[in-house]
Structure formats: C-alpha cells, structure tokens
Image (spheres, rainbow, N blue to C red):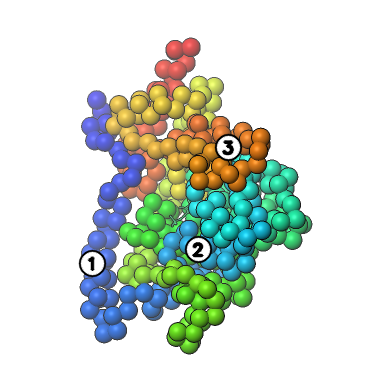
Amino acid sequence: MTTATAERIPFFPSDLFEGDREALLDTVHAIGTGADQKFILGERTAGLERALREGLGADDVVACSSGTSALTLVLTAMDVGPGDEVVVPAFGCAPLAATAANRGARPVFADIDPLALTADPAAAEALITERTKALMPAHMFSVMADMPGFRALADRYGLRLVEDSAVAQGGTLRGRPAGRWGDAGVYSFVQVKTFGMPGEGGAVVTDDRALAADVRMLRNHGQDGVHRFRHHRVGYNSRFDEVMAAFQLHRLAGLPGRLARRAEIGAYYSERFASLADQGIVAPPVGGDGRCHYVYAVLAERREALVDHLAAHGVDSHVYYPRTLPEQPAFAHYAADGVRPLHAESAARRNLALPLYPHLSDAQVEHIADTVCAFARSQDRDR
Ligand SMILES: *Cc1c(COP(=O)(O)O)cnc(C)c1O
C-alpha cells in the first residue's frame, strides 16, 4: 500500500473548520458576554449582508436561517400558493419540491440535461400551463443550470425566476455570479456548501427591493424592523445567528482561495477521467464558464462496484440522490401520470460523488483519481 491509502479519506471531513477554531471560540465569548446579549439579527448579520451585497453588486442580500428557508421566503414573497405550479428539476434535493408543496403549490418536475444534470429549459417549457407561477432551476454538483435559457423562458412567459444557487456560491456564468440570474437567488451556508459554516444559515440575493423588503419582514414574523410587535404579514422565524455572521465575516476573505483550490482539484479529476467514458464512467468536462465546485460527481454504470473499490482503497464516496424527486414517496402524487423523466432516472442510478474539499492534499487527490482509473481499467479487462 502507498502512504496515501494508509489513511482513510473521508467524504465529509471532520476538520473543515479546524483552522478557525480560535476565531470561533473568541466570537462565542464576545457575543455571549456582550452588553446587549444580541444573538440574532444584530450588527454582525447586517455586516455579512453588506459584505455579500457589495461583493455581488446586488441591491440587497437578506440572511436567514437556511437555504431551504431562503427558498420558502422567496416563494412566499412572490405569493406562490394554492393553485399555483412551480417548475423544478426532477433530479435534486427535497427542498426544491418541498418548499413549493409547503406553500400549497404544486411542484412540477422537469427532466434534466443528461450531462449537465441540471433542469433542461426545453423540458421545463413543455410543462408550462396557465397555472405556472415560477421556474425554479437549481445548480447541481459542479455545473450551473442553463440560466440564460431559463431567464429567456421566464421573460417570454411572464414567470418569476427563482435561482436555487444553494450549492453554487462563488460560481459565475458569462461573468454573472450564481445567485444573480434569477429574480431572486438563494445560498445555503450549511457546512458542506462552498461557503459553509458550523451551523445552519442561508441568504436571499435580489435586485428587487420590494421583494427584499418582504423577505426581510417574513424572516422575522412579518415585522418591519421599525415597529416591534407590529406584524404586517404572516411570517416565519428564519432569523440569522450573530455568532455565525461573525464567523462568516472572518472566513469571507479566504473564500476565493478555497474556491480556487476546489476548482483545481475538480479540473485535475476531469483531466484524469476524460477518457473513461468508454469504460462506463462519465465525468463533468474540465472547468470553465458556468462551473461551481461544490461536489465532484461522476456517472458510473457499475456504481456499487466502484463504491466498493474506492472503499477498499480508503476512499469514501457518496450517492447524493439515489432516486428522482417524483420517485420519492413524499412527492410521487405530484408527478404527472405516465411521464417519466428518463435522464433524471438515469442520473439517480449512476451518480457518485468523490471527495472535494480545499484541504485535500495533492497526494490524496492523486490517490483518488488513480483509484477511479484503476477501477475503469479493470472494467475493460472484465469485458
Ligand atoms: C443544500 C441545498 C438546499 C437547502 O439548503 P439548506 O441550508 O440545507 O436548507 C436547497 N437546494 C439545494 C440545491 C441544495 O443543495
């Protein structure tokens, strides 16, 4: 065994925030012993919102309690409710369908592009009815959705465009940041995301000031921030934590460097895997425009065998979405009878994510790539 295999390479590393431990503990102490004991929605949250807004060139950023909650606040501010339909990807995470459903609306599942794995605008267009209120594409793994296509579609049909950029903070497409293509975009700060933190949080990004004002009210029980205990709308508790805001402000300067390291690892994997398609392993193309670097997922015909092979060589891997959203018991009754999203089903059967985080060493990255390539070669021999 080489040295790289002696140590297990976890998929979710337990030392993500090790380098910032002191800063976090100091922050907890400072806020916990501060004169005003302000643990939520204080000056640190406002500071994080300002820093993100300025970095993005957006009119407003509203921090809230999670990415899921950010989607809920946006859909609520857009008055999405009973009788409405929201077109979402058939392949993706539960919040895409659940946030629409919890508003009383119907999630409508669009098939995906077979390589990008993001919702296909043409498939989405075929599902538009007079009840459609919003389109909600999502960026997936390391590829941004076809936002120019969705922007044009939303404009053509007069629909709201919600950009689920929960995984894509830091990505850009045609020079425009992920989160800036929709009428509103959302980010998630849950630990594994590109700007993750040790807790729950998210944000809404928008140039629509009226929408932002609504989202701001809705995140704190419909209050306007001026008159306490005056509730203008039926809202939520989706407030942001001051300790996390301070921690994110502390981590913000290092984000470009961490994103660059993720991109470098992703590009290396793609170079190594470019020739494996004939052996049943399809990788995303080497990076560039419209890429984000949240998760590096390949599509593998013999996924279970690849999982075992990786594990035998000390590499943990992860299947994100083993079934499509319309195949989930919770959402099956929203699916249209007899219409199966075949590309989404194929991706659900084959997707496998490899470790991708900034503090992976070059030797670890090489070992992971070597292990995948050795598996592919053994497939060739077995044929
Ligand atoms: C993570 C994620 C969310 C939800 O974010 P949370 O902060 O976990 O609530 C929503 N959409 C997508 C595409 C995600 O990956």
Question: Please, what is the three-letter code of the amino acid marked with disc 3?
Answer: Ala
Which of the pair 21/66 is nearer the observer?
66
Neighbours of disc 3 within 10 Å: few (<14), some (14-19), many (20+)? many
Q: Residue at x 36, y 74 (%)?
A: 40
Q: Which residue is mark 3?
A: 344
Q: From the image, tell me which residue sits under label 2.
A: 70
Does the Cβ of the disc 2 residue fall within 8 Å of ligand 1? yes
Q: Please tell me which of labels 1 and 2 falls first in the chain.
A: 1
**Helix, strand or loop status at disc 1:** helix
Q: CA distance from mark 3 to mark 1?
A: 43 Å
Identity of the residue drawn at 44% across and 12% down = 382
Which comes before the other along the chain, label 3 or label 2?
2
Helix, strand, or loop for circle 2?
helix
Structural crowding at the residue carrying mark 2, measured as other residues with C-alpha within 10 Å and reported as few (<14), some (14–19) or many (≥20): many
Coordinates of residue 43 in the picture (x, y in percent): 39, 79
Residue 271, given in percent of the width and then of the height, sits at 49, 34
Label 1 belongs to which residue?
25
